Amino acid sequence: MKTLTSGEIASYCDVNLRTVIRWIENGKLKGFKLPGRGNNRVLVEDFIEFLERHDMPIPDSLKGDATPSILIVDDEMPVAKSIQRVARRAGFDSYIATGGFQAGIMLSQHEPKVMTLDLSMPGMDGYSVIDFTREQSKYKDLKIVVISALDDISLERALEIGADASLQKPFSNHDLTMVLEQFMSM
Amino acid sequence: MKTLTSGEIASYCDVNLRTVIRWIENGKLKGFKLPGRGNNRVLVEDFIEFLERHDMPIPDSLKGDATPSILIVDDEMPVAKSIQRVARRAGFDSYIATGGFQAGIMLSQHEPKVMTLDLSMPGMDGYSVIDFTREQSKYKDLKIVVISALDDISLERALEIGADASLQKPFSNHDLTMVLEQFMSM
DNA sequence: TTTAATTGTGACATTAGTGACACTTTAGTT
DNA sequence: AACTAAAGTGTCACTAATGTCACAATTAAA
């Protein structure tokens, strides 16, 4: 039940915030008010219905909500494939990146909901990946699942700097499934 | 998803607002209407397509939705900075990425016109970066300038798999300027 | 907590859509 | 050349939607 603020709708429609509020007041756009000062919220589905009703283009970022995906970052293809199998069995779409550069591009292009990250990829500092991602407000909702053969201390450090979960290699399919299902349903 | 009003298009085309509205009504120019009184909005991409279809000049302010930029990929910050200085002196905006992951994200986000790439970054295979980039039609116009301390053979191999130019470290500011100016003006 | 960013509001300034009509251009006809 | 018709475009006044601005209240972030 995701909602949008009046400001977000304003920027989606490339229209002034004032105008969005007037749309809602007129009943042209269905929404509701928060108890506080009456800030407006609109259900994504109502907004999409509104856009369709007026033949307005629907932003990709809203369409994408339909099929949230997982980005698997691991340089060892067999491992990546096995993660992908688990993901598929749980009903999720996924993409594999075997290098940092690919991972960056795919993250930006597919905007996945979850990224699994091998901390110990040769020549790539997993920590700095987490760091850099967390700095970007664009990816504040991205869930990062660290998967690594490193010790507990390393995994904990990853959690400290912004990872959302960690799994030690070798991981059980069950644990991975649990984590994925939890994050993908948020 | 930037849009234009009928008035903005009118002034771009140096035409009366009335006429723009008629274009939209006739279907000559694709657009949509706001819910209120039916004010017209046109996606920038649709407008550009319209201009091209009629061999009309495209205003600079619409071309790249920003000034074309350069992405500098180098793990050594001093080197990166010195490249950036050269770029700035030649009048170009630039961004620095010190890792593959950052490079991928920045490439995707900023869509630079030129990317300078250090081939010998630790733990990152420059060749696979070139390879992967060239596979994506999205970046077919991106110019890749390889900068490396490696030997001639390595540089030639980079050119073979898709780089557009190469410079051996240490490079002269003059040579770099020449290359950047050439590619940025294309 | 403190601080920064977002949001709602009212009054007012701008801009856009509409219809009717005049003007210009073009093409075809005599 | 001269005339005509048709199609496209510009003009004008009017109305309504949208944008702007400053300010206060709220919410989110640090």
Image (cartoon, coloured by chain):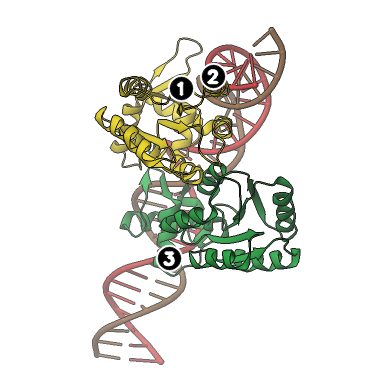
Chain colours: A yellow, B green, C brown, D red
Q: Name the residue under label 1.
A: A166
| Residue B18 seen in this snapshot | no
Is residue A16 placed above or below B42 in the rendered structure?
A: above
SS assignment at label 3 = helix
Chain bearing mark 2: A
Q: Position of residue A180 (x, y in %)?
A: 35, 24
Q: Position of residue C26 (x, y in %)?
A: 37, 79
SS assignment at label 1 = strand
Is residue C5 placed above or below B122 in the rendered structure?
A: above
Q: Is residue A92 left or right of residue A3?
A: left
Q: Mark 2 points at which residue?
A: A156
Q: Tags 2 and 1 in contact by the CB under 8 Å rule?
A: yes
SS assignment at label 2 = helix
- Image point (42%, 21%), residue name: A41
Observer-side mark, 2 or 3, equals 2
- Image point (42%, 47%), residue name: B41
Rounded to the nearest angstrom, the CA distance separating label 2 from label 1 is 8 Å
In the rendered image, residues at marks 3 and 1 fall on the same chain: no
Chain bearing mark 1: A
Observer-side mark, 3 or 1, equals 1
Rounded to the nearest angstrom, the CA distance separating label 2 from label 3 is 55 Å
Q: Between residues B176 and A111, which one lies in front from this camera angle?
A: B176
Q: Name the residue under label 3.
A: B52
Numbered circles on residues, count: 3
Q: Between residues B143 and B152, which one lies in front from this camera angle?
A: B152
**Mark 1 is on which residue type?**
Ser
Q: Quadrant of the C terminus of chain A?
A: top left
